[in-house]
Amino acid sequence: MTTPPGRMDKEQFRALGHRMVDWIAEYWQRVESLPVLSRQAPGELLRALPAQAPETGLGDEGWDAVFADLETKIVPGLTHWQSPGFFAYFPCSASGPAVLGELLSAGLGVQGMLWATSPAATELEERMLEWLGRAIGLPATFFGPLGGGSIQGTASEAVLVALVAARHRALARGAAPEALVAYTSTQAHSSVVKAAMIAGLCRDASGNDALRFVPVDAHYAMDAAALARAIAADRAAGRVPFFVCATLGTTSTTAVDPLRALGEVCGEAWLHVDAAYAGTAAICEEHRAMLDGVARADSFCFNPHKWLLTSFDCSALWVRDRKALIDSLSVTPEYLRNRASDSGAVIDYRDWQIPLGRRFRALKLWFVMRHYGLEGLRAHVRHHVALARRFATFVAADPRFELVAPSPFALVCFRLRGDDAATDARNRELLANVNASGTAYLSHTGLPRADGSSRFVLRMAIGATLTEERHVDAAWRRIVEALAN
Amino acid sequence: MTTPPGRMDKEQFRALGHRMVDWIAEYWQRVESLPVLSRQAPGELLRALPAQAPETGLGDEGWDAVFADLETKIVPGLTHWQSPGFFAYFPCSASGPAVLGELLSAGLGVQGMLWATSPAATELEERMLEWLGRAIGLPATFFGPLGGGSIQGTASEAVLVALVAARHRALARGAAPEALVAYTSTQAHSSVVKAAMIAGLCRDASGNDALRFVPVDAHYAMDAAALARAIAADRAAGRVPFFVCATLGTTSTTAVDPLRALGEVCGEAWLHVDAAYAGTAAICEEHRAMLDGVARADSFCFNPHKWLLTSFDCSALWVRDRKALIDSLSVTPEYLRNRASDSGAVIDYRDWQIPLGRRFRALKLWFVMRHYGLEGLRAHVRHHVALARRFATFVAADPRFELVAPSPFALVCFRLRGDDAATDARNRELLANVNASGTAYLSHTGLPRADGSSRFVLRMAIGATLTEERHVDAAWRRIVEALAN
């Protein structure tokens, strides 16, 4: 019996691996010259690809065709998240050390569902979440023997498992399922209501009456007094408030919910903190005030893959009471039992998450934290915050524009002045023109007017790994030019 | 303003990238000489790592220390899933082309939540799922204009979104939430009950009475007549059967549920097919009979990351009615709206899954299918199936052992003959001895006796990319030797 055909031998893998590394290094160098937002029309790539897989594999020369297709078919269809001109949504920052970590993880190919299926994958993750938690100033209860950190794929998964743990705890305390009520602000991320839909709490994005959207103050932060009133009214009606999701750095404007005040009014409810974007900033002392009151939180999440150079996906979730999480997610068939797990001396991360299997994602966090050091990471955050302040001064100095929300981090929300539908349309057109230019890609949001209608607002989110002053300046020039046309 | 410190420049990334590629190539060559199951004790790596992240980053020479730590701290803590002696659980097969795909995905760093955020990521995925669906013989309804395929992280996530879509459809048809009942076999994967717990259908792994575990036949496949009786009884009691999860290739023994018969009795319920492991085999004509009746299924999942060389994570999920899935998971805040999505002409994969964000995983599927070609992939499967038959003949020829279940694919379930608790203990001890040897790593399962107790059974799952005849022979020799001691 022989080796099956097609196995890539050592020398071919080395040659192609080096070629791919070089291709990526070149890509990062030239990415700023490519249009940030893809100009491909729907179906273009679909039509350029054969309808069926090839019967025969590639020969020795075959990979030349793959690299050619990469250039002609894939690259034009990319929206370049790693471009220094990418200012849309929030960043999803890759870096050299993170890519090396992903490469190593793929090469090792270990699956760390249980401690036993690779102790190093579990223990490196435990330690990295401790490094990271200390770096942002989380209390040690979040990584002490009762609490703990884990890497989830995204903040959406983190809020879902937090919600499920909270429900499990509330039911265990005797609540009736139909009595449960959750709360978040009107400015919370869509993943909160998506989690409630998946968990069966509500049927659609309205939240029905199992998820309440608490009003925000003038700066788009949750109104703690309004939360207190909602909770009191629900209690009086026999409902059981079991989950509150606070946001540090909302998606629309990076507003910061008042964590301490929320903790004081949320009673027995599980308090989850979604700091997906802004959590990174807490590695800098000057941004740490937002964590005031975090010791009361039951779970805390932020995404190193957003602004901490760690490459998607890497969402850090800490819980104060790991047992609550594990109790709600643990199922142990015979085929997963083993001595280490039975001993209780180890963490099996499968019980901390939705999937069973998991990649070795702690490697990239390790590489990033070692390569940059905390000093380098802080400098990285401060660099982007300074660029955002610079951009905000451009906006403030131009009488045609207005800043529409505070910019505590590296997102600037702005728009052409005026408050009617025609101005909304002009802002929308301005955004389309800038994005069509290829120089920069910004996104938008809607912010509520007093009458309940939505104002169209441009979002300039600075945070790509390669963004420098000249890219921010070029984006502003492009905005002003688009206006002149 | 200058570049922040620590950014890895082009030449450093190239040099380290080449070094990492070479390290991986060497690792794959030497991995068979390492003990398959890690010998590390709980806490060993934790104690070897500092408690805090370094303040200062690595200098030019710093990465030598990282590579040294990799060797001395990480490798000893790995259970080597890519070892040719890895026969535990199911394989999680990496390959050269898949690792190149992961590397490229990390380097591009695009996040394909929406079509607009990288059209190529969405359209390559659409096409690859069509290639893959055709390759295993799925009807075109699963990738026609109404259906469609997507890459999920794991089969656990796939069954959860299928369950959520099924519930949404049932509620839309007027069912009361508390009337819903789901069904799967007693041999189904733990992820089915975990999904039901997350979705709020049941509180714990017992399923309560919202998830029924249907009995199996003598070969551990779901008993269709028993399912029919359970459904009839529930309907008579006013319940609404809304979800049936069939398994093609169960985890314990790779038993195959009778898909056509289940489809005939499941009525209006959503029929999900979990073929996580065995789906790969359907690329070979001789294994395609298990798909008989699949046209009735509402969703079908298999994991190319298990046995199709595609590196974890890559779970393929097809649905016949994409609208049912999207309706149950879609939430659209203003900041995610865009022209392409509003036109309805494109797929936004965020609405097909739990997370919002997603990696560009279609690249690795593309590389694998092109590199090997379908011929190469079929040869790969047949190679392992032949090795499993070889191993089964060793077992059958040794009077001390018995085969305890059919081996339709590349898993062999066996044990020392005898049916008392003492034999269970001897089998357990045999497994521990073999795994301690370092030569091979097998896992186990429990199979029900007539009296309800559990028989301890050894599982020899062949499927690692590097496994050849000599590794299977060595594993058998080790088993026999362990017995002699």
Image (cartoon, coloured by chain):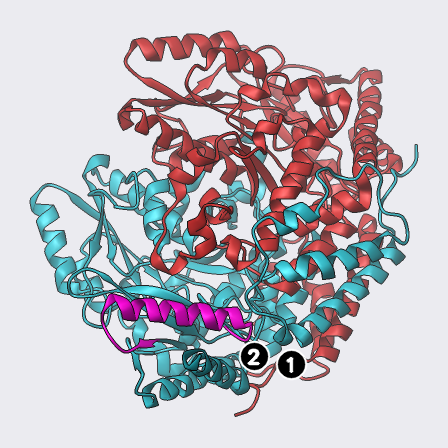
Chain colours: A red, B cyan
Q: Do the residues labelled 2 and 1 touch (CB within 8 Å)?
A: yes
- Can residue A90 be seen by looking at this rendering? no
Quarter holding the C terminus of chain A? top right
Residue at point 68% right, 26% down? A137
Identify which amino acid the numbered label 1 is placed on. Leu
- Disc 2 target residue: B373
Residue at point 29% right, 38% down? B203
Question: Mark 2 Cα within 10 Å, few/some/many (few <14, many 20+)?
Answer: some
When asked about the image quadrant of residue A249, the answer is top right
Which residue is at the front of the view, B114 or B193?
B193
Chain bearing mark 2: B
When asked about the image quadrant of residue B20, the answer is bottom right
As measured in the structure, the alpha-carbon distance from the residue carrying label 2 to the one carrying label 1 is 7 Å
Percent coordinates x, y for residue B454 in the rendering: 25, 62
Residue A114 lies left or right of residue A332; in this view the side is right
- Disc 1 target residue: A58
Indicate the secondary structure of the residue bearing disc 1: loop
Q: Residues in magenta? A: B414-440
